[in-house]
Amino acid sequence: MPESLPSGAPPPGFRVIDLTQPLSPATPMWPGSAPPAAAVESDLARDGFFTRRVGMSEHTGTHLDAPAHFVAGRAGPDAIPPHRLVVPAVVLDAPGSPDGALTAAAVRADEAARGRVPAGCAVLVRTGWDRHLDDPARYVGALDFPGVAVDAAELLVARGVVGVGIDTLSVDRGAATDFPVHGRVTLPAGVWHLEGLVNLAALPHRGALLFVGVLPLVGGSGAPARVLAVLPDA
């Protein structure tokens, strides 16, 4: 195993939660997509330094869907303004069953308990599906994982969110093979997605600040991202 760097310390008064999958040939992928691959270009023993050439789908592991993913002529990952990538996070819970979905009724119930979903935030949908990440046959399965219902997506767009994230392969339910949320609701409204998140169980429903370190790939449909949440110390 590679040696780990010293853990250091987060900024005083804060703690940092990593919401990102590691990327390797073992990363679970959408059916038909090749996993990440790397080839050594420069070798320490031979060249005195180490580099690799890496190839992967734009939608690998923890990644961002830009509006261009489903809407011609819309923004790619390089065109999303930085201020829309550092935003407050609202965590909403959804059933973790294969046919589960975040519904508009569930959003309104959360708002009744915790306050209205504010404009300018990102909503992270916590289903607990990342518990299957080490079992790709279950995590991907026959595309039988939970997601976001169209009525919930429409309500979140109306609330003015800038992004929607989830701990599954897709914001749409796996069974929704026509991608109604992607194609008809969120991306056409300029709302980005984060898919393949992990560790949402460590976040409160309100109070985290989200940092989305997406690769600014010019002309892309999306890109892998290092996603971090910053929380005040309890």
Image (cartoon, grey):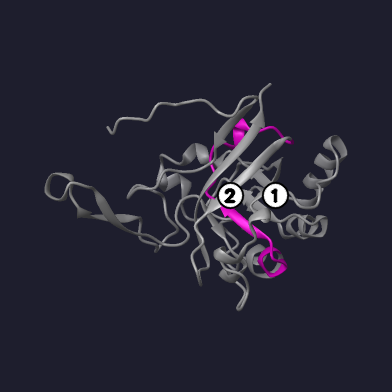
Check contact, mark 1 vs mark 2: CB within 8 A.
Answer: yes
- In this picture, is 18 found above or below 75? above
Judged left or right of residue 7, residue 208 is right
Q: Residue furthest left?
A: 46
Which image quarter is the C terminus in? top right
Residue picked out by circle 1: 122
Which of these two is toward me, 214 or 200? Answer: 214
- Going 73% across and 57% down the picture, which residue do you hit? 153
Which image quarter is the N terminus in? top left
- Going 18% across and 45% down the picture, which residue do you hit? 44
| Quadrant assignment, res 135 | top left
Percent position of residue 42, x then y: 20, 53
1 or 2: mark nearer the eye:
2
**Residue type pointed to by label 1:** Ala
Q: Residue furthest bottom?
A: 73
Percent position of residue 209, x then y: 67, 40
| Quadrant assignment, res 125 | top right
Q: Residue furthest top?
A: 234
Res 222 seen here: yes
In the rendered image, residue 49 lying in the magenta stretch gets the answer no
Res 171 seen here: no
Percent position of residue 47, x then y: 15, 50
- In this picture, is 65 found above or below 25? below
- In this picture, is 160 found above or below 2? below
Label 1 crowding class (10 Å Cα cut-off): few <14, some 14-19, many 20+? many
* Residue 95 numbered mark, or none: none
Which of these two is toward me, 234 or 196? Answer: 234
Label 2 crowding class (10 Å Cα cut-off): few <14, some 14-19, many 20+? many
Residue picked out by circle 2: 212
In the rendered image, residue 187 lying in the magenta stretch gets the answer yes
First to last magenta residue range? 186-206
